[in-house]
């Protein structure tokens, strides 16, 4: 927090925190926040504009508080016999995570995650007065000791990110089931990158039946090429959603957001076709990096974690000097690059070749 803010009567437990801050720099090649690089087509832009025009005349009224039509569309997209009642939506999956922690975490409670993982899980935990417990991963970023650690710590909320950010690795379902059995509280599987997973990697959605404490979160920010829409969602037992109704703000999801998200879902073939291209680009990028003697974590996501550098800041800056912004995050010595268009990936490779003199 800034010195100026510290002079205000702000909560003591916030004083040493830093706000989420992936740099938003205006550079030609932006491969730092795992967005889908393909902008909506002219046809999809038309559909979105039409959807907004269709609700513009109703904006004097509050939105559908329960976003029932949108939740039905999301359930249909997910499949697995889900319904509007077993699906919930909010302004990005970050808000979903916040609502989950407000309902199931809070003062005197704990949340546990396996690091390195998504930095917002500990930050939102802390901000909701939920004590964060950092559990460990294996050396190859697997989670073979996860159930044991959960049994030992007895957390109220467990986060499992699969595919994980920033490593890209996914977690086998039997391991998630074992964590569920060991956990006394909620188990949240953050599947923000689910659509990018390699063939044969199942989703935790298949584990939902008979597990009322299990939650699977998703987002339209990554595969759906809709980061600007701010739409995250979850699938869970309907009773979980009953609990969230207590903490969500009334009318949290605007009429415009609901309309835009539904228009994007109605045209899902378009973003999902780009997902296929991005998965292929990811696998090619992994092969190229390994071919150049770099270490690369297996990735089921739309980004790749690579290293290991003695001075990763210098590599990051060298790329930025050449107009390529990637993310300086993850374990010491590693960098994370989002898979872009073929042109963007070529620019990244050319810049990295220069910086490392490969
Ligand atoms: C990007 C990301 C999210 C998502 O965010 P939104 O708020 O839906 O944009 C959630 N979890 C993980 C692991 C992510 O990387």
Image: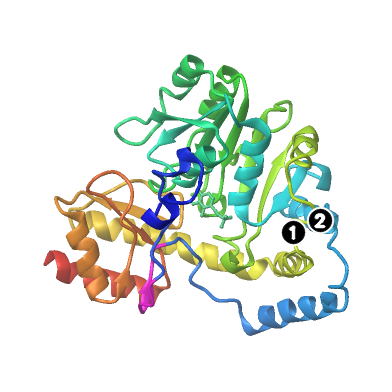
Query: What residue do we see at 66% from left, 67% from top?
Result: 269
Q: Nearer the viewer, residue 350 or 212?
A: 212
Q: Quadrant of residue 55?
A: bottom right
| Residue 207: mark in rendering | none
Q: Nearer the viewer, residue 47 or 76?
A: 47
Task: Name the residue carrying label 2.
Answer: 67
Please tell me whether residue 28 belongs to the stretch shown in magenta. Answer: yes
Question: Quarter holding the C terminus?
Answer: bottom left
Query: What residue do we see at 41% from left, 57% from top?
Result: 4
Task: Name the residue carrying label 1.
Answer: 253
188 lies left or right of 286:
right
The answer to whether residue 67 is seen in the rendering is yes
N-term-proximal mark, 2 vs 1 = 2
Q: Which residues are magenta?
A: 25-32
Residue 25, position in %: x, y?
38, 72
Q: Main secondary structure of the magenta part?
A: loop
Q: Quadrant of residue 135?
A: top left
Q: Is there a contact, CB below 8 Å, between mark 2 and mark 1? A: yes
Residue 320, position in %: x, y?
26, 71
Residue 242, position in %: x, y?
80, 37
């Amino acid at each position: 927090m800034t010195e100026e803010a510290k002079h205000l009567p702000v909560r003591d437990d916030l004083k040493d925190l830093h706000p989420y801050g992936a740099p938003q720099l205006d550079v030609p090649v932006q491969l730092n926040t795992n967005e889908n690089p393909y902008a909506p087509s002219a046809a999809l832009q038309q559909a979105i504009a039409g959807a907004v025009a269709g609700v513009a005349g109703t904006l004097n009224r509050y939105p559908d508080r329960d976003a029932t039509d949108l939740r039905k569309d999301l359930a249909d997209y997910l499949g697995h016999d889900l319904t509007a009642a077993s699906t919930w939506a909010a302004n990005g999956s970050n808000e979903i995570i916040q609502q989950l922690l407000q309902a199931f975490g809070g003062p005197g409670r704990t949340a546990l995650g396996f690091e390195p993982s998504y930095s917002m899980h500990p930050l939102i935990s802390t901000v909701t007065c939920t004590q964060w417990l950092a559990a460990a991963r294996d050396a190859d970023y697997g989670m073979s000791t996860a159930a044991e650690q959960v049994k030992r710590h007895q957390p109220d909320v467990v986060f499992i990110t699969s595919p994980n950010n920033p490593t890209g690795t996914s977690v086998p379902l039997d391991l998630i089931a074992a964590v569920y059995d060991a956990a006394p509280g909620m188990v949240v599987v953050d599947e923000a990158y689910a659509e990018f997973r390699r063939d044969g990697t199942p989703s935790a959605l298949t584990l939902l039946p008979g597990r009322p404490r299990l939650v699977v979160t998703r987002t339209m920010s990554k595969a759906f090429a809709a980061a600007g829409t701010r739409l995250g969602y979850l699938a869970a037992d309907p009773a979980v959603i009953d609990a969230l109704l207590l903490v969500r703000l009334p009318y949290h999801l605007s009429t415009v957001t609901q309309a835009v998200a539904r228009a994007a879902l109605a045209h899902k073939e378009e973003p999902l076709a780009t997902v296929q291209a991005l998965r292929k680009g990811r696998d090619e990028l992994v092969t190229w990096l390994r071919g150049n003697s770099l270490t690369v974590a297996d990735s089921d996501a739309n980004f790749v974690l690579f290293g290991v550098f003695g001075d990763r800041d210098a590599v990051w800056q060298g790329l930025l000097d050449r107009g390529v912004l990637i993310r300086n995050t993850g374990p010491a010595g590693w960098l994370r690059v989002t898979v872009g268009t073929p042109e963007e990936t070529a620019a990244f490779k050319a810049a990295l070749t220069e910086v490392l003199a490969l």
